[in-house]
Image: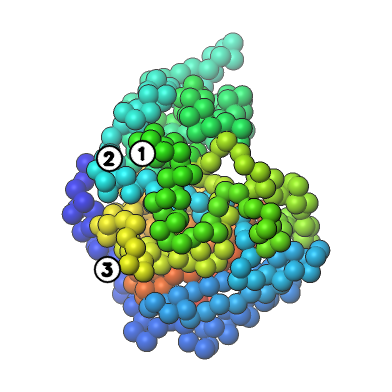
Amino acid sequence: MQSKACHLLTTLLIIFSGCKENKPSLYVENGILNEVVKTRIDSTLKTFVDSGNIAGVSALIFEKDKEVYYNAFGFADRDAQKPMDRNTIVQIYSMTKPITGTALMTLYDAGKFELDDPVSKYAPELADIKVFAGEDTQGQPILETPRRPMTIRDLTRHTAGFGRNSDIPGLGKLISEADALNRENTLAEMAEKMGNTPLYFHPGERWEYGPSVDVQAFLVERISGQPFADYVKEHVLSPLEMNETRYFVPEEDQDRFSAMYLRKGEGNLMQLPDEQAKSNYLNHWPLTRGGSGLTSTLDNYMTFARMLVHNGTFDSVTILKPETVRLMATNQLADSVKERSFLPSKGQVGFGIDFAVRLNPPQSAEENNGVVGEFFWDGAASTLFWVDPINDLTAVLFVQLFPYDQIGLHKNFRDAVYGPFELTN
């Protein structure tokens, strides 16, 4: 296992190695967000609304501890003509994951586990898990013993081996039958069902998005002895006064809860019925997922991002040690991990602990813009946030759009912030 000092050195090398290749990777002494940039962001976001490809959008940016940009365009609820607003509540989907990872790493800071501990040390439910290796001539699964144990580090970087799609030949039907992520399950029941479902691949051999962060939530529950929802509230959300980041939206706040939209083609946007789009959040369900399930507001999530850019402390409240945040923002994927699913579509990135981590500047105008050393993630309904420690900048973009960003919203927003791509020697 690499030492914390080694991880810190690696982070610094990553941050400074690419700073001369592309202008957005440079520290901008006088700040990025001038009036020209703010106007460019306004124009970009408004254009997406005017085109009919999104109903509403909001964005908030802090730079050097100052709010330098906020605006909102369009509607949170188009049918009811309710504008998108700073206090609009949205479904953040996978932007739940970094919050879960933060909760897990508070236990790491407390010395409760090491990243290379086998998961089975804390979750015997997963001790006998096998790897799917195809089917025999009778259609029965062929199972193998993992080449090495699944570790907590695997869970944090999506190399644990879990599959998530029901269309995986042979394995997909087993995942569907287990139904581990059914909202009627508790986290303990989820873990038991996962332990009885074969893995998609051997731990550590590829990057594949899946339920690893839900297992992180289970580990938080198991190691701490507290229900996960209680632990994350007590150790992350409440100390940061993120009181509107929740699994359940109470009746008195539901008028601020954004509608969800399905894009069916250019300028063709359908508002989904609330009973379909919001049912996970209007009732208390047994499953409190680590990989999804939270709602939030712009300012709440910005508080979380600002805690990270300040290396674990915000407004005199310390959530994580500085070296732990730097560890989380350090690439954990070895070069030997060649298969990386959709991760390369995010740009020149690796993956840290529940964040993508930018390793190199963009090499073409088609790639996502960004700064070497930034870490970020997004959500299924096209939300996005990033932390740019080089420029002390944090950005949060909220929209409620399915399918996930097929319109280039994230790329255009990043381009509006950092300026047009320019490759330099």
Mark positioned earlier in the residue sequence (2 or 3): 3
Q: CA distance from mark 2 to mark 3?
A: 32 Å
- For label 2, the residue is 112
Residue 411: image quadrant is bottom right
The residue most toward the front is 252
- For label 1, the residue is 224
Q: Amino acid at mark 1?
A: Ser
Q: What is the quadrant of the N terminus in the image?
A: top left
Mark positioned earlier in the residue sequence (1 or 3): 3
Q: Residues within 10 Å of mark 3 (few under 14, many from 20)?
A: some
Where 299 falls versus 282 (above or below)?
A: below
Colouring used for the render? rainbow
Which residue sits at x=77%, y=60%? Answer: 269
- For label 3, the residue is 16
Q: Does residue 357 appear left or right of residue 345 in this picture?
A: left
Give the foreground label among 1 and 3. Answer: 1
Q: Amino acid at mark 3?
A: Phe
